[in-house]
Amino acid sequence: MDDTRRARRIDLIFASVTIGVGALFFHESRKLPPARFDPLGSASFPLAISGLLVLMGVVALAMALVGRRLGDAETSLVVGVNQPASTARRRPLLAVFSFAAVAAYVLALQALPGTYVWATALLIAVLGIAMSARDARAAAIAVAIGVGASVFLGQLFGTLLRLPMP
């Protein structure tokens, strides 16, 4: 079997499994009891997430059926991430650093309440810089994404969903 057919079959299997898992979670989420104080109900968030999972699985299935590879992207927000495999190098210390950074982030949120937006911006920016090329452009992109994502998430949870972050 040639590589293209094999890759397409793997993408089809992945999309089908994603749809199945999303459908199973959707079915199970409907069994959750109603919430006492939540006007939307305790199942609203799991239902929305599992519905999105099914939707993304359907999109992935459609892409695989028309012959597009699911993991191939022409552009990326992380500079240098689309390098061919032969030029990419293994970076096991990056995994250790990422784990330590997330652990420090969680500890900072526990120890310093009210720092969610800045701690999240810092985490995303630091991990973005660590994972991309070491130049000013990559650092600026990582900082911009970190600040933008943390402000967006702070507004989403704090204002729209009325779930203030720590």
Image (tube, grey):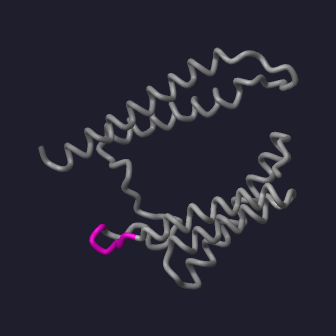
Side of 117 where 122 appears, left or right: left
Q: Nearer the viewer, residue 51 or 38?
A: 38
Q: Specify the quadrant of the image occupied by residue 123.
A: bottom right
Q: Is residue 116 magenta?
A: no
Residue farthest bottom in this picture: 136
Magenta stretch: dominant secondary structure: loop
Q: Specify the quadrant of the image occupied by residue 130.
A: bottom right
Q: Is 110 rendered above or below residue 12?
A: below
The span shown in magenta is: 85-90
Q: Is 125 rendered above or below residue 152?
A: below
Side of 61 where 108 appears, left or right: right
Residue 88 image offset from top left, x and y in percent: 35, 72
Q: Is residue 87 magenta?
A: yes
Residue 90 image offset from top left, x and y in percent: 37, 70
Which quadrant would the N terminus be assigned to in this image?
top left
Side of 64 where 149 appears, left or right: right
Q: Residue at x 50, y 38 (%)?
A: 56
Residue 162 image offset from top left, x and y in percent: 85, 41
Q: Residue at x 27, y 71 (%)?
A: 86
Residue 147 image offset from top left, x and y in percent: 72, 66
Side of 138 where 124 appears, left or right: right
Q: Residue at x 71, y 56 (%)?
A: 106
